[in-house]
Amino acid sequence: MFNEQVILGQAETYDSFYLYDESIILKHTSQLKEDFQGVEFLYSIKSNPNALVVKAVFSQGFGADATSLAEVKMSNQLGIPKEKIHYSAPGKSIQDIEQAMDISIVVADSIDEIIRIQKVAQKKGIITEIGIRINPNFTFYSQSGMPSKFGIDEDIVFENAERFKKLKNVKITGIHVHIRSQELNADVLEKYYKNMFSLAIAVQEKLGITLNFVNMGSGLGISYSKQDEPLDTVSLGKATAGLIAIFGSKLSNATIFIESGRFAVGKSGVYVTRVLDKKISCGKIFVILSNTLNGFIRPSLAQLVLNYSKEDSPAGSEPLFTSKNAFEFIALTDEAEQEVVTLVGNLCTQTDVIAKDVLMPKLKYNDIVVITNAGSYAAAISPMQFSSQAPPAQLFLTKYGDIINTIK
């Protein structure tokens, strides 16, 4: 799962750090490529924008799911061709559109945005091919739609078909749908993909266009807790190939994209911290660690959700909260005797708690604690300016065994 000797070696230099393992990234990206024939993948950069992590994923032929102009520019600078950089995000500014249009496929998130793209393209004197993000009349679990901040309602897309045809500088050549992430049930995803193929065909027919791409979004989950059954990518890949065989003749020009979400990198990272202090208060043992909430916020957010929720296993709210027991806390020690402790951080706030009343080996000052599942939505969403603490290092273990400090 992780290289203990490498971690102990780096802990001699750093009080806290992320360690991303390139070999695990390559294993998971290769798994997707092998299991899904006839599909291309886009890496969701927002899950982990670390430059070496991104390069490792791109080295596998993945394109970019970019959610900001900065991610578009990063992908372009790393050599990803325009047709494999999909810029999909709500609320793009005119400046975002102007700078992204020549180096990415801009995926419009609203009717108003399509009009803004038309104005930019007209000013540039070009005809630009775009995608549209659709909020469909289905979800993962229902054949009815839901209100969303993302995309254009399916019915509104079809109502505006004639209006789209009149746009002189915009050509719609693709669709994008993303409803949720972190799905572990292959049957649920198969049904969703089937709905997506039907939607794509309906878009072609009702808008009178030929699609160059269908971006089916993500949903690919990873197992967080020990109770999770891993997503059966072999079964889902075969089912997806079967759907392509059924629907592909009507979408013969379209590249089918799936966003990798956290699947490519989530398991590749661990977060490492050390014991700074230990105390007993009113009979409870508190172990104080370096850079918890401010270094890797998600375990602390999990505690907040569990504190306020009346449910034993509250529903996830990605990417901030996945589930109860989504992380393991592993002490690198030879100590055999155990005790129940609460793991907290060194910030001056009561919310800096990552685990309550957990059974751990008896920890002492300077011992190392490893937190799993830190490869995605970890450093990227943690408030590292909180309390002006020194931020954790981000280290990259190459497939050759070299260690690179990526943030200096």
Image (cartoon, helix red, strand yellow):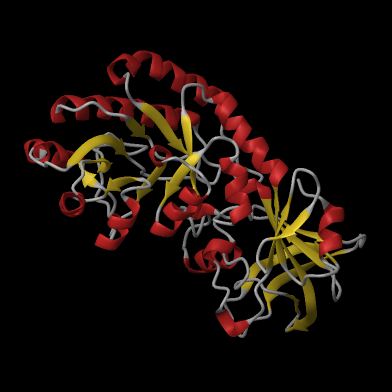
Q: Position of residue 75 (x, y in %)?
A: 48, 49
Q: Position of residue 381 (x, y in %)?
A: 52, 64
Instruction: Please tell me whether residue 268 is drawn above or below residue 186 in the rendered image.
Output: below
Q: Position of residue 162 (x, y in %)?
A: 7, 36
Residue under the point 77% across and 55% down = 403
- Count of numbered tags: 0
Image quarter in which the C terminus is found: bottom right
259 vs 212, nearest the viewer: 212
Q: Residue furthest front?
A: 125
Q: Quadrant of residue 166?
A: top left
231 vs 268, nearest the viewer: 268
Q: Quadrant of residue 211?
A: top left
The answer, for residue 225, to whether it is visible in the render is no
Q: Is residue 337 left or right of residue 325?
A: right
Residue under the point 18% across and 48% down = 125
Residue under the point 81% across and 50% down = 3
212 vs 227, nearest the viewer: 212
Image quarter in which the N terminus is found: top right
The answer, for residue 295, to whether it is visible in the render is yes
Q: Is residue 112 left or right of residue 35?
A: left
Residue under the point 40% across and 39% down = 217
Q: Position of residue 329 (x, y in %)?
A: 73, 59
Instruction: Please tell me whether residue 54 is drawn above or below residue 160 in the rendered image.
Output: below
Instruction: Please tell me whether residue 284 is drawn above or below residue 374 in the rendered image.
Output: below
